[in-house]
Image (cartoon, helix red, strand yellow):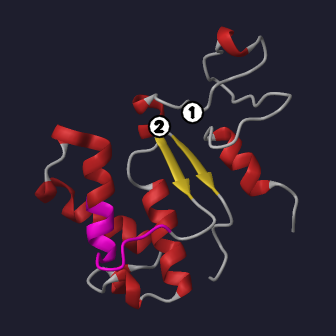
């Protein structure tokens, strides 16, 4: 509707730079290099901060050939690095997919998903792969 939801999320992720004002996040450390009131939610070049964010973008960002379980394992591996062991996370992934009512999609390639199933998977990836902060941009579109 043009209210600026996607733009706000992109500013919080530092994909867009605000021309004025600042974004404040509760309990976040303040960055004195950006002014007294500005809080860096994410910064370019900051792997740690970026790795702690869960993002459900407005448009689906999935690999067609991967199924829901493979997507979840991929994102867990990216977030956890060497601490990730596939067998340790199998039941967790199944429970996470069940929470977004995507159990039946676990084995099917995402290219075969309906629009609603793709959105559910995006929400699941954002919320259940270890993020401490989650940004949801139009998460229910198509559901």
Q: Quadrant of residue 42?
A: top right
**At numbered mark 2, what does the secondary structure look like: helix, strand or loop?**
helix
Look at the picture and state if 121 lies above or below 55.
Answer: below
Q: Position of residue 15 (x, y in %)?
A: 62, 43
Q: Quadrant of residue 57?
A: bottom right
Residue 135 numbered mark, or none: none
Q: Label 1: which residue?
A: 42
Proximity of marks 1 and 2: CB atoms separated by less than 8 Å = yes
Q: Is residue 54 left or right of residue 65?
A: right
Q: Label 2: which residue?
A: 50
First in sequence: mark 1 vs mark 2: 1
Q: Residue at x 53, y 71 (%)?
A: 60
Mark 1 Cα within 10 Å, few/some/many (few <14, many 20+)? some
Q: Position of residue 76 (x, y in %)?
A: 30, 52
Which quadrant is the N terminus positioned in?
bottom right
Span highlighted in magenta in the image: 61-73
């Amino acid at each position: 509707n043009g209210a600026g939801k996607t733009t706000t999320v992109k500013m919080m992720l530092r994909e867009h730079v605000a021309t004025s004002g600042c974004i404040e996040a509760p309990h976040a450390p303040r960055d004195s290099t950006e002014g007294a009131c500005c809080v860096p939610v994410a910064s370019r070049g900051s792997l740690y901060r970026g790795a702690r964010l869960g993002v459900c973008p407005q448009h689906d960002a999935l690999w067609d050939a991967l199924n829901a379980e493979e997507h979840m394992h991929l994102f867990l591996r990216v977030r956890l690095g060497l601490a990730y062991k596939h067998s340790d996370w199998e039941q967790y992934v199944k429970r996470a997919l069940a929470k977004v009512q995507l159990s039946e999609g676990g084995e099917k390639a995402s290219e075969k998903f309906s629009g609603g199933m793709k959105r559910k998977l995006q929400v699941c990836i954002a919320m259940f792969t270890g993020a401490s902060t989650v940004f949801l941009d139009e998460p229910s579109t198509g559901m």
